[in-house]
Amino acid sequence: MNKVIKAFTLILITSQLFTACNKGGIDDDDYGIFYYQDEATVIIDGLIDSDLPTYWSNYISDFPNTELMIMKDCPGSTDDIANWEAAKEIHEQGVSIHLPSDAIIASGAVDLFLAGVNRTREAGSKIGVHSWEDGNGNQATDYPVGHEEHQGAIDYYIDVGFSKEDAEAFYYFTINIASFDDIHWMTDEEIEQYNLLNP
């Protein structure tokens, strides 16, 4: 009987250790598309996916003094909910976000950029926006203004500091300026108009 209890205890401890070290199969030292630059600065470079919250949790646990995120080539997101979840954490942790001159961010990556408590960019950086598609062939513009399908993105913008008016203005601009299979690169005037920067 004691052998059975000991074996069960060993299995339980091993299972707990494996779970602690492998959140969803991701090791604690796996940062995904986050890359260390220095104790205060992280680089993000790549496509955002469902694992972003775990990658960010891993990174900020190891480097809690991170104050600045630099975005490089981030073409978008395959999971808006996960993107918004990680982005709200980044915002709440007081991280600023910067676009260097060679940065290219689009679609869901623009949402992540807006999480920065301070948002800055250098000339030459590109910010691309477009409509979304729900996977069934319906685009955002197929739903009328005020429809509940629009509210998730608008609420996210409010969560990261936009007024309701600014959140709605920017959101409806993005879905009307380009279809899902197209992209609109924002002009300097549009970036200023929709308050994307706040140095």
Image: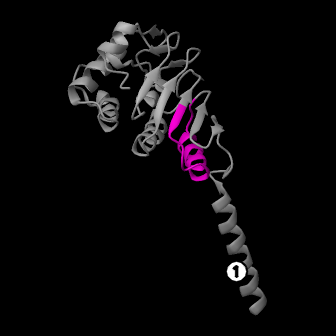
Q: Which amino acid, by three-letter code, is at mark 1?
A: Thr
Frontmost residue, 180 versus 68: 68
- In this view, the residue farthest toward the right is 3
> Measured from the top left, where is residue 150 in percent x and y?
30, 27
Residue that appears at 50% across and 40% down: 67
Q: How is the image coloured?
A: one colour
Magenta stretch: includes residue 53 = yes
Quadrant of the drawing holding the N terminus: bottom right
Q: Position of residue 101 (x, y in %)?
A: 56, 14
Q: Which residues are magenta?
A: 48-69
Image point (74%, 77%), residue name: 10
Residue ID for mark 1: 9
Quadrant that contains the C terminus: top left
73 left or right, relative to 131: right
Please tell me in which quadrant of the rendered image residue 12 appears: bottom right
Can you say whether 52 is above or below 78 in the image? Answer: below
Q: Is residue 33 left or right of residue 87?
A: right
Task: Examine the rendered structure and indicate whether residue 141 appears above or below residue 44.
Answer: above
